[in-house]
Image: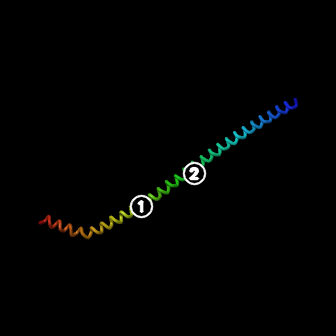
Amino acid sequence: MELIKRIKQAETQAQELIEKAKAQAAAQAEESRARRLETLTQAEHDRRKTIEAAVDAAQSQGLEEVGGLKTQAEKKRQQLRNKVANKMDPAVAKIMDYLKG
């Protein structure tokens, strides 16, 4: 009788241990899910910040390049005007002589 009582008591303790282990495993799984979700959220936030920074940098660089190209184009136009200005008067004179003749 005592042996049966001990066996039942051992079975009860074993069942309690199993239930505790299940509860601990479930709690750890939930904690892991929460950490994973937090990590994914932070990674998404970091990714967006990185993209925004890259876009801002690209925009700034693009504006600098546009300014440089405008300056370069204006210099080339001025050089062309200077180069052509010396030849303009003789060319106009030749055309006028041709039209008169």
In this picture, is 65 found above or below 21? below
**Element under disc 2:** helix
Q: Which residue is mark 2?
A: 46
Q: Position of residue 61 (x, y in %)?
A: 46, 59
Q: What whole-number distance in Å separates the C-alpha atoms at marks 1 and 2? A: 32 Å
For the point 21% across and 67% down, the residue is 91
Farthest-out residue, left: 101
Left/right of residue 7 with respect to residue 26 in the rendered view: right
- Which residue bears the numbered disc 1? 67
Q: Nearer the viewer, residue 42 or 62?
A: 42
Q: Does residue 49 appear to the left or right of 87 in the view shown?
A: right
Residue count near mark 2 (Cα–Cα under 10 Å), binned few <14, some 14–19, many ≥20:
few
**What's under tag 2, amino acid-wise?**
Asp
Query: Looking at the rendering, which quadrant does residue 33 occupy?
Result: top right
Give SS at disc 1.
helix
Q: Nearer the viewer, mark 1 or mark 2?
A: 2
